[in-house]
């Protein structure tokens, strides 16, 4: 089973001073979580997921309109190890 990489949505490695070499194979893959609903409902779910340590509220996208349904939607990208 894959493991979530903690706080990966808000942290990135600083640039390296090493010269560029062959691209390493990334052992991570993105998984996207989508919320669709009212603004207040999405905020409640985001606050709950934050309270249990799943994701920081600022890691979620800003509200957007789903082009198919016209409903508000917010997206979170989590990175997991393969």
Image: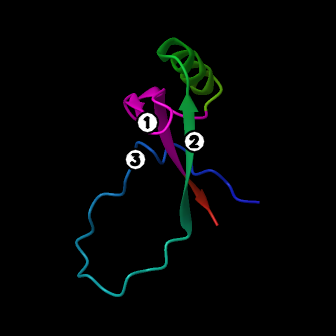
The numbered mark, 2 or 3, whose residue comes first in the sequence reads 3
The mark nearer the N terminus, 3 or 1, is 3
Magenta residues (range): 54-78
Task: Name the residue that disc number 2 marks.
Answer: 33
Query: Is the Cβ of the residue at disc 3 closer than 8 Å to that at disc 1?
Result: no
Q: Secondary structure at mark 3?
A: loop
Provide the secondary structure element on which disc 2 rests.
strand
Q: Residue at x 22, y 72 (%)?
A: 17
Q: Say above or below: 35 vs 10.
A: above
Q: Residue at x 42, y 38 (%)?
A: 67
Distance in Å between CA atoms under marks 2 and 3: 18 Å
Other-residue count near label 2 (Cα within 10 Å), few / some / many at <14 / 14–19 / ≥20: few
Q: Residue 69 versus residue 74: which sits nearer the camera?
A: 69
Residue 64 shown in magenta: yes
Q: Which residue is mark 3?
A: 11
Residue assigned mark 1: 59
Q: Residue at x 48, y 39 (%)?
A: 68
Please identify the residue farthest to the right as the structure is shown: 1
Q: Secondary structure at mark 1?
A: helix
Which tag, 2 or 1, sits closer to the chain's start?
2
Count of numbered labels shown in the rendering:
3
């Amino acid at each position: 089973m894959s493991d979530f990489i903690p706080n990966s949505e808000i942290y990135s490695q600083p640039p390296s001073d090493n010269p560029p070499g062959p691209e390493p194979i990334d052992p991570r893959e993105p998984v996207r979580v989508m919320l669709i609903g009212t603004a207040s409902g999405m905020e409640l779910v985001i606050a709950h997921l934050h309270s249990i340590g799943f994701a920081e509220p600022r890691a979620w996208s800003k509200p957007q309109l789903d082009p198919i349904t016209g409903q508000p939607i917010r997206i979170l990208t989590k990175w997991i190890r393969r």
